[in-house]
Amino acid sequence: MTPDDSIVLRFEDVSLHFDATVALDHLSLEVHPGQTYVVFGAAGSGKTMLLKVAVGLVRPDSGRVSLFGQEITGLREQDLFDIRARVGILFQEGGLFDSLTVAENVAYPLTNQRVLRQAAVTPEGSAGNGAVRTVDDRVRESLRFVELEETLDKFPAELSGGMRRRVGIARAVVSAPALLLYDSPTAGLDPITANTIIALILKERDLRNTATIMVTHRYQDGHLMANFRYNPNSGQIERARGGGDVSQVSTKFLVMNAGRLVFEGTEPELQASQDPYVRKFLRVGGA
Amino acid sequence: MLDILKPPIEAFQEFVLLSIRAVRNIFRSPHYADDIFVQMDVIGVGSLFIVSLIGLFSGIVMALQMARALTQYGAQGQVGSIVAITLVRELGPVLTAVLVAGRNASGIASELGSMKVTEQIDAMRALGTDPIQKLVTPRLIATAVVLPLLTIISDFIGLIGGYFIASGMLGLTFSEYWTTAWQALEYNDLFQGLLKPFVFAVIIALVGCFYGMRTTGGTQGVGRSTTSAVVSSSVWIFVLTAFITYVWNRAFVKQ
Ligand SMILES: Nc1ncnc2c1ncn2[C@@H]1O[C@H](COP(=O)(O)OP(=O)(O)OP(=O)(O)O)[C@@H](O)[C@H]1O
Ligand SMILES: [Mg+2]
């Protein structure tokens, strides 16, 4: 594998400008395997740009970005493709191809990414029982994961907003990526649907122990990520037991303001913060 | 002063870069043949009717205008040659291209623009596809193949329109009209008449893709890109036809 897999993603003094607007301002950050990062920030504070710069969709003006220990800042697009194959992304605006069916959308990473196309078997399943799973199997499995198996042949435009979000998640997780980026997965959804979406994100995180960065406006989302976990036995989301539970320590909160990282810490530290900007994200009844 | 010039110069740079990449991709795999055929269908078959209609009426109008002028000199027998030359050299290529610009530069810009603002273009790049290879190059190839064909059809139907007037109003026979029309055309004219639509096709496809790919600002932005694509491709068509005609005359026509 790549030289240094102990750090999934590293930002070193990264800045990005659009003419006069600052999107990212000397931002440094490290993402470790199996950890969860919840990103808060006002509209336009650079949350989406943080995710896009992380996978090389947008090139920063200065600073260095490394993915899985490999610096990507100067890489050509062709070389980036193979690295991006290990990252799953749910886009804020959906990013589902509306000319393709749900099944084709979910199959897209498997059929278009060079490294995934070459590995006909799943990365984690290939060593075990030796059963080769076809793209079709994996697409069905991924759609079953988000409980939308019946929509295989529909087009994205025929689905509700919440269903589209779930298809987006299915497409992001189908390749079993090592890093998952969710851009505002609950934005514009009712509280019930929003919680189902968070439950899916938790399920993916806890079943595969995937490093996760989630941008959100809802404090509730971050609270769930930090304090709840997926129980594979019951198939339900439940409160993680004990104060020192793993998921508690491994969830970090980041707060962005005008491209700068103004807070980085655990949930108790977030709640204790005196910064008026940071405190704004704490409302909505907390627990 | 320099600040005013900066955005258009940067935009032109971007356009040139996109053009180079799109052309380079023609010779690189993967090739998305399906997308090329879909686009040929959208652009070619979709425009066939309207292009024929406009071709017919431009032929009729040309013949009507020329009939009056030629009759004054007793040269109404020459209507076929005049209609043929103006249609094949100039009117056919330009009118067809302007129509296709209105239909397809806008269609391309709005389709790619919506893909841009819904992050489908980003998703493509994130999932291992080069959007220029997948979206721009097929549209470029399809337009470059189809527009010259549409122009030939339009020219021919325009000549038929001219024949209606020539036979109906000037009393020319079938062979009188078509013989003069055919003899008036030199290889030179035919070549110019095919070079122009090819160049216009490249402009229409690339300008449409360029405005589509740089769309920002949601649905409103898509509307703006669409308008800009039609306006600039139409302007470029007229500028280039003047340029090509000028260069052509300097190079090939003995004064
Ligand atoms: N293509 C672009 N051109 C110009 N400015 C841009 C562009 N994309 C982003 N920006 C600017 O960069 C800044 C950060 O944008 P970003 O999309 O990361 O915000 P965000 O935190 O995701 O906001 P939201 O919560 O509304 O999604 C904003 O000021 C935005 O206006
Ligand atoms: Mg955003």
Image (tube, coloured by chain):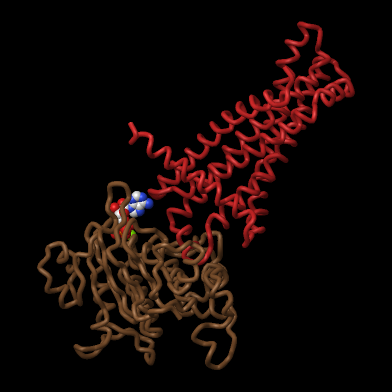
Chain colours: A brown, B red
Q: Nearer the viewer, residue B131 or B101?
A: B131
Q: Position of residue B173 (x, y in %)?
A: 88, 20
Q: Residue at x 66, y 58 (%)?
A: B33
Q: Nearer the viewer, residue A187 or A160?
A: A187
User: With respect to residue B37, does B97 lie above or below?
Assistant: above
User: With respect to residue A168, does B250 lie above or below?
Assistant: above
In the picture, the quarter occupied by the C terminus of chain B is: top right
Total count of labels: 0
Q: Residue at x 30, y 62 (%)?
A: A14
Split into quadrants, the picture shows ligand 1 in the one at bottom left
Q: Residue at x 55, y 65 (%)?
A: A101
User: With respect to residue B133, does B214 lie above or below?
Assistant: above
Among the 4 quarters of the image, the one containing residue B55:
top right
| Left or right of residue A282: residue A132 | right
Q: Position of residue A43 (x, y in %)?
A: 27, 57
| Left or right of residue A56: residue B24 | right
Q: Nearer the viewer, residue A233 or A29?
A: A29
In the picture, the quarter occupied by the N terminus of chain B is: top left
Q: Nearer the viewer, residue A267 or A150?
A: A267
Q: Position of residue B197 (x, y in %)?
A: 67, 36
Q: Position of residue A179 (x, y in %)?
A: 39, 75
Q: Residue at x 54, y 87 (%)?
A: A126
